[in-house]
């Protein structure tokens, strides 16, 4: 049947299957949502906005995306579900019309030392195939170009049943991998300072080992004493060569201790497996301190940091080996791939070229494939994850983005907008949590939550078009057209911080004079070298407080009071007023309710089904033993204090019987950053990204320093919150501090006393200072991308 005939026979009425064009949410109560009901159009781009903490993430991620993922997980077998994270059913009455949700969030990519930008996307896999086909000399299959695959060979006899007889044959095998044998594909070799591992004047039983967690009281002690390889009562300096080798380097060996089969392994291979398999940044602080003191990392002398074996590096295409290709800036590599004219691998080259072009389109053309994924910022990690979805042939799915403009210069936001519209035009539903007016402007549908944050939010203030939002009179509607004016006068510097010959990453021997005693903003397109200049030349340390973008993590037992250190003075005040121990006023210590162990809820694990959390009947969710709640301070017990908002607590601890200056100082800082509405005992897991960013800001502002370095403090902040942040920065500068901010937000640029603009482009097209001066001069000159966008923003 021809296409024309089929079309003619179709009914003119809408098919019932095409009528499901809305996602309906009824009675959503997740976190602070107040029983809201909403209809979201499918196959459109919907932007969710509202102040930080108004409930955007609770609606989009905690309700719609969470239910979609939970229902998909339930389609797997019970066996598979046992290995997957269980997601509880969101607190919502009805969810209709949801489709498969793909979440592209700001979680940093894993900092595994073996993970790079190339391995995290499909780019490295395709590049390896290209080299295995076209590389000269030919050295093997694609795994011969993989730095995570070692070369292995072996030989031996195999027993085969043949024609009723057992025959022994000699067989050998070889696997050619690309891993450098010296550094095992890490790119760096480690050198251990043995004096940091043990005190050689003591014996093992006397506690010679100084490695964190290696105590002789537990399993390690049992293994060392029962191994028989050395005398645990002899000082280490008296060990023979063999005994010292067994202690430090012995390969895993099966031993039997007290009838139990155990494995003994030397200290150094054990440390390499347990501490060094992750990136140093992912380690706990006390282990990181040990690693930095005991171990030095140097570039592998054999592979020169490329992680690849000599044979792999010898195979080349047009004079370029795979290590050179991975080290190239991706925008250059895309050009090199396009110039390869090989019909035998034409489809593969086209696919690889498209993937590399996607990096350039999304504003990451300045990266290289060998860049470790743990070094990417939150915004870069999010955009790297997007690469996988841009070429996807999936349609009718829901893409959920969490502030995709983070870390993007106004120049790059336009490109991001085009990519999101392209995803929508393929027939997908795109849900975006966002604050930037440039992105709200492209929305087909806008949902504004609020009116405030925390308990003052959680309601839908507006739902409709952009024009409707402007006229709605909501907080977002009023601030949408806000434009910070350039300062009439700027502050006079009190000194200068000289940076000379900065060459970190892509910086080109940069000299800069950073004025002190004023608000300095360092800006430029993503990848122009801002963080390299500031963090590389002004390291945190004596007199410098550096507040980076690192996410704060906390369990459901952590809350603003424990994270900021506020709970310590509160516990001491309660203990002093009642003549008892401070430990009684900790829900993680002696005062904890014995039934729920101080969690306030009891978690019931239902195996492959989602776990259930029920409020503890013993303490009614208060977390403390009833006897502890009989102790009062200023007429309140500890659970009532933890239920207070920051504003209430500030008043409570500021005067009267409960006056506690140490607690009041911390509460003042929390109020300063706009977190007055948070309750002290609210679990950290329920805070939004913007709230966590400001909680970190409040905590680190307590540190003593003359220079504050802030890396994108506006991340996750609503337009109204940015005003409060600017007031906070002004107060810091007026108190005699120097504030240096790495930022793309035009309101912060306009508010600066001095701007340092890097560029003109990203990667090797950047790394130079293209402007230094006041914001007014930058706008007047319009000589850089930043100048053009800032000029348009302030309307000059």
Image: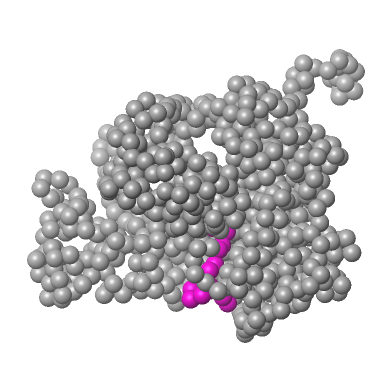
Name which residue lies at 79% across and 36% down.
Answer: 445
On screen, 205 above or below 660?
below
x, y percent for residue 770: 76, 76
On screen, 107 above or below 307?
above
x, y percent for residue 187: 47, 68
Q: Is residue 77 visible?
A: yes
Residue extending furthest front?
656
Q: Quick check: 64 left or right of 650? A: right
Quarter of the image with the N terminus in it: top right
Q: Quadrant of residue 118?
A: bottom right
Question: What span is colored magenta in the figure?
Answer: 537-552
Pick the residue in front: 130 or 258. Answer: 258
Name which residue lies at 79% across and 68% down.
Answer: 487
Name which residue lies at 67% across and 60% down.
Answer: 727
Pick the residue in front: 293 or 239. Answer: 293
x, y percent for residue 189: 41, 71
x, y percent for residue 502: 61, 80
Q: Quadrant of residue 708?
A: bottom right
Name which residue lies at 55% across and 27% down.
Answer: 91
Pick the residue in front: 684 or 369. Answer: 684
Quarter of the image with the C terminus in it: bottom right
**Residue 200 on the magenta span:** no
Q: Quick check: 483 left or right of 495? A: right
On screen, 661 above or below 302?
above
Q: Main secondary structure of the magenta part?
A: loop
Colour scheme of the rendered structure: one colour
Q: Number of labelled discs?
A: 0
On screen, 24 above or below 664?
above
Q: Is residue 391 visible?
A: no
């Amino acid at each position: 049947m021809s296409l024309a005939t089929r079309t003619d026979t179709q009914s003119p009425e809408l098919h019932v299957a095409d009528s499901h064009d809305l996602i309906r949410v009824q009675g959503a109560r997740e976190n602070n949502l107040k029983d809201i009901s909403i209809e979201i159009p499918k196959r459109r781009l919907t932007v969710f906005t509202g102040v930080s903490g108004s409930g955007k993430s609770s609606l989009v991620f905690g309700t719609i995306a969470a239910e979609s993922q939970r229902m998909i997980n339930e389609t797997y077998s019970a066996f598979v579900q046992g290995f997957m994270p269980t997601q509880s059913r969101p607190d919502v009455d009805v969810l209709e019309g949801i489709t498969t949700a793909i979440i592209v969030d700001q979680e940093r990519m894993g900092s595994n030392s073996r993970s790079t930008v190339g391995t995290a996307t499909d780019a490295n896999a395709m590049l390896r195939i290209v080299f295995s086909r076209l590389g000269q000399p030919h050295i093997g299959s694609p795994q011969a170009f993989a730095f995570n695959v070692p070369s292995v060979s072996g030989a031996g006899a195999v027993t085969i049943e043949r024609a009723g007889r057992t025959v022994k044959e000699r067989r050998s095998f070889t696997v050619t991998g690309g891993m450098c044998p010296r550094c095992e594909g890490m790119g760096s070799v480690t050198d251990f300072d043995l004096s940091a591992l043990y005190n050689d004047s003591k014996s093992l039983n006397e506690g010679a080992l100084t490695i964190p967690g290696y105590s002789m009281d537990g399993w390690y002690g049992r293994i060392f004493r029962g191994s028989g390889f050395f005398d645990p009562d002899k000082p280490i300096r008296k060990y023979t060569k063999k005994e010292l080798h067994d202690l430090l380097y012995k390969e895993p060996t099966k031993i039997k201790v007290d009838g139990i089969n155990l494995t003994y392994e030397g200290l150094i291979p054990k440390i390499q497996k347990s501490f060094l398999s992750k990136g140093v940044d992912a380690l706990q602080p006390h282990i990181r301190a040990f690693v930095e003191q005991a171990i030095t990392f140097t570039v592998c002398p054999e592979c020169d940091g490329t992680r690849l074996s000599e044979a792999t590096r010898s195979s080349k295409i047009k004079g370029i080996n795979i290590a050179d290709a991975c080290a190239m800036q991706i925008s250059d590599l895309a050009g090199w791939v396009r110039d390869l004219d090989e019909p035998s691998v034409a489809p593969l080259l086209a696919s690889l070229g498209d993937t590399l072009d996607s990096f350039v389109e999304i504003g990451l053309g300045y990266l290289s494939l060998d860049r470790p994924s743990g070094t990417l910022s939150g915004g870069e990690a999010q955009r790297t994850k997007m690469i996988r979805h841009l070429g996807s042939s999936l349609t009718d799915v829901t893409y959920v983005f969490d502030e995709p403009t983070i870390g993007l210069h106004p120049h790059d936001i336009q490109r991001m907008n085009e990519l999101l519209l392209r995803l929508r035009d393929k027939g997908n539903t795109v849900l975006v949590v966002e604050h930037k007016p440039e992105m709200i402007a492209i929305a087909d549908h806008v949902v504004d939550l609020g009116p405030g944050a925390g308990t003052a939010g959680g309601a839908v203030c507006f739902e409709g078009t952009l024009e409707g939002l402007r006229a709605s009179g909501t907080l977002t509607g009023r601030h949408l057209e806000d434009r910070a004016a350039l300062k009439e006068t700027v502050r006079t510097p009190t000194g200068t911080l000289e940076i000379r010959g900065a060459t970190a990453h892509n910086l080109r021997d940069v000299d800069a004079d950073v004025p002190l005693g004023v608000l300095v903003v360092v800006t430029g397109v993503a990848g122009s070298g801002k963080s390299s200049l500031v963090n590389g030349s002004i390291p945190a340390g004596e007199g410098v407080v550096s507040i980076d973008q690192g996410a704060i993590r906390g369990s459901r037992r952590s809350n603003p009071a424990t994270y900021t250190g506020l709970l310590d003075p509160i516990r001491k005040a309660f203990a002093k007023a009642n003549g008892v121990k401070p430990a009684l006023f900790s829900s993680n210590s002696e005062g904890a309710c014995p039934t729920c162990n101080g969690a306030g809820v009891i978690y019931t694990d239902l195996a492959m089904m989602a776990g259930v959390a029920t409020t503890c009947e013993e303490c009614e969710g208060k977390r403390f033993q009833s006897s502890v709640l009989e102790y009062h301070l200023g007429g309140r017990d500890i659970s009532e204090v933890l239920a207070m908002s920051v504003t209430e607590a500030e008043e409570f601890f500021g005067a009267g019987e409960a006056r506690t200056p140490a607690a009041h100082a911390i509460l003042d800082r929390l109020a300063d950053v706009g977190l007055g509405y948070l309750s002290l005992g609210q679990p950290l897991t329920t805070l939004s990204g913007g709230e966590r960013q400001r909680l970190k800001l409040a905590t680190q502002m307590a540190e003593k320093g003359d220079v504050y370095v802030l890396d994108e403090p506006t991340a996750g902040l609503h337009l109204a919150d940015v005003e409060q942040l600017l007031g906070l920065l002004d107060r810091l500068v007026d108190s005699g501090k120097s504030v240096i901010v790495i930022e793309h937000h035009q309101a912060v640029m306009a508010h600066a006393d001095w701007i340092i603009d890097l560029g003109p482009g990203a990667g090797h097209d950047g790394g130079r200072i293209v402007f230094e001066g006041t914001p007014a001069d930058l706008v007047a000159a319009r000589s850089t991308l930043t100048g053009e966008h800032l000029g348009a923003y302030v309307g000059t």
